[in-house]
Image (spheres, grey):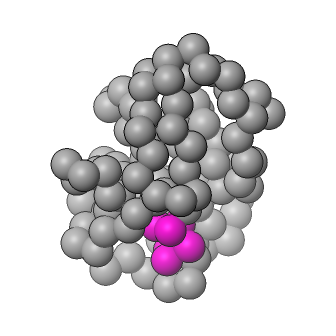
Amino acid sequence: MEAIARYDFNSTADDELSLRCSTWRTPIAHDWYYGCITRADAEKLLLNQHEGAFLIRVSECYLGDFSLSVKCGGGVQHYKVLRDPIGKYYLWVVKYKSLNELVEYLIVHKLGHFPWSGAT
């Protein structure tokens, strides 16, 4: 998989790559990252999956941000992945140095039972 950066990005963690606009990179593929798919496509992909199945996608509404889509309660919930001013990722309170760390936490703590509310 190859990618071209559309925007500058300064990494904030060891497992991220800094990118400059128009810089070619070959990113490490993750089975949970689906890139630029729509909310509706995420729902189609997840509806027949097990409770707690999830994916990360590029946000349709917020350019340069990510959304978490997760199979929950017979449907699919969507959450905006937030970033603080120093670049840490979070969904509610706990912050992580990278998107990978956030996903690792979600995997370990069973996605199907979210302690927060407010799907995007």
Q: Can residue 64 be seen in this view?
A: yes
Residue farthest along the top direction in this orientation:
22
Residue farthest along the bottom direction in this orientation:
109
Magenta span contains residue 104: yes
In this rendering, would 42 be left or right of 31?
left
The residue positioned 74% from the left and 35% from the top of the image is 26
The residue positioned 43% from the left and 25% from the top of the image is 8
> Number of callouts in the render?
0
The residue positioned 76% from the left and 28% from the top of the image is 2
Residue farthest along the right direction in this orientation:
1
Q: In which quarter of the image is residue 66?
A: top left
**Range shown magenta:** 101-106
In this rendering, would 38 be left or right of 85?
right
In this rendering, would 61 be left or right of 77?
left
Quarter of the picture containing the N terminus is top right
Magenta span contains residue 59: no
Q: Which of 97 and 89 is in front in this view?
A: 97
In this rendering, would 117 be left or right of 70?
left
Residue 116 in picture, x, y percent from top left? 27, 73
Residue 76 in picture, x, y percent from top left? 49, 56
Q: Nearer the viewer, residue 39 or 102?
A: 102
Q: Which of 69 and 57 is in front in this view?
A: 57
Residue 19 in picture, x, y percent from top left? 52, 31
